[in-house]
Image (cartoon, grey):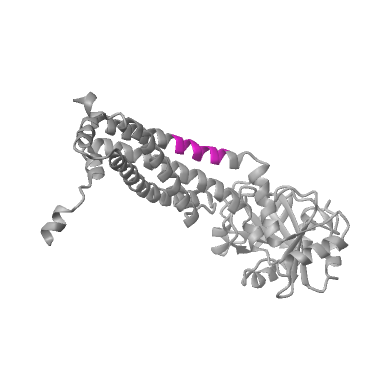
Amino acid sequence: MVWRAWRGRRIPLAWLLLTRQPARLAVALAGIAFAGILMFMQFGFRDGLFDASVVIHRRFDADLVMISPRSTSSVSMAGFPRRRLVQAMADPDVIGTTPVNWNLLLWRNPDTRDTRSILALGFNPSDPLFRDSDLEERSGVLTQLGRILFDERSRAEFGPVAEWFRDGRVVESEINGRRVRVAGLVSIGASFGADGNMLTSSETFLDLLPDTPPGSIEVGLIRLRAGADAEAVARRIQAELPPDARVLTRQGFIDFEMDYWRSSTAIGFIFTLGAAMGFVVGCVIVYQILYSDVSDHLAEYATLMAMGYRLRSLLGVVAREGLLLAVLGYLPAYAAGLGLYALVRDATNLPVGMDLDRALLVFGLILTMCMGSAFMAMRRLADADPAEIF
C-alpha cells in the first residue's frame, strides 16, 4: 500500500523548476516583493489620508451634523446662523444640540517662537462634543477665559507642550497675538488638513477671533432619541430650514470630507497611480522570469510532449510556478509593509496601518500579476514542437 502511494505521488515539477536556479528565484521574489511594498505604501498613504481627514468627524457625539452649504472641507468651513441649530430643536426626535466654532488659527511655538496653523474647536464646555467619556471631565477647565486643551498627538513643530505640561510647568503661548494657557491635554491626532488641534470654549474662541459674529458657527451637532431614523429626521429638518444651512447624517458628514480629498485634490489619484506603476513593474519582472524559465527548458517540455504529456498539463506547471511566486513574493512584502507602516505612524502621527481589506487587495493584485505573467509566458510553451527541436 505504501509502495502504491509512493509510485502514485506527483512530482513537484513547478517547485523544482523554480528552485533549480536560486539566484533567478531570488531576483524574481525581490521584484515581486518590491512591487508589493510599493502597492502597500501607496494604498496605505491614500487610505491614511482619508482616515486622517475624518479623525475629528468620527469622534463627534452627534447623529446629524449641520454645516453651511458654502463649506467645502475641514480646511474651508464657512459660518451659518446659530439660530438654525435652535430651529432644529423643534423636531420631536431631537434631544440635544452642540454649536461648534471651527477654524485654523496661528499658534506660536512656546519654545522656538515660530508660528504654525492649528485647528481650533470652540464649544460650550457643558455640552457634549466627543464620544470620549473623559472629555466631559477635562472640559470643565475651559470655563475660564483663555484656557485651552491641547492635542498631545499634534506634530512636534508646535513645541514640547505635552512634555512641559506633564512635567508640571505652566505652558502659555500666543494665538493670533493673544495669550492662552494650556489647561489640559486631549488625544486626537494630526491630519492632512491640520497638523495639530486644540479645544477651547466658545467665549475664548470669539476672543481669539474678535471679527467672528457672535451668532455664527461652523458646525452644529444634533443628537437624536434612540431608535430615530437619522436620514428621515435630516430630511424633515432640512425642509424646514432656509437654504443657508445644510443637514447631514453623521456618515454623510464623514463622506463629505472624504469626497473632497478624493475628488477635489490630486492626492488620491497620485497614490493610486503609484500603486498601478508598482503593479506594472511587477508584471514585467515576473514575465521575464517565467519566459526565461520556459525558454531554458523548452527541450525538456518538448520531450515530455513526445512522451505523451498533453500541452494542458504542461501549461498547468507554468501556472503553478506563477502561483508559487505570488505566495512567496507576498510574504516579505506583507512583513515589510507592517514595519514601514509603523515607521510612518511614528514619524507623522498619521493613522497608517495594515487592515484585512488592504492585505487582501494587495495579495489579489500580486496574484493577478503573477498569473497574468504566467499566462503570457505560456505562449512560448506552445512553441515546444518535438519535431522541430529534435
Magenta stretch?
Answer: 270-280
Q: Nearer the viewer, residue 257 or 180?
A: 257
Q: Residue at x 55, y 50 (%)?
A: 48
Q: Residue at x 68, y 42 (%)?
A: 264
Q: Nearer the viewer, residue 48 or 103?
A: 48
Dominant SS type (magenta): helix
Give coordinates of residue 66: x percent, y percent: 78, 59
Seen in the image, is 281 located left or right of residue 229? left
Q: Which corner quadrant of the image does residue 379 belong to? A: top left
| Image quadrant occupied by the C terminus | top left
Q: Residue at x 57, y 65 (%)?
A: 168
Report if residue 275 lies within the magenta region: yes
Q: Nearer the viewer, residue 305 or 213?
A: 305
Q: Is residue 171 visible?
A: no
Q: Which corner quadrant of the image does residue 295 belong to? A: top left
Return the residue found at the far left: 3
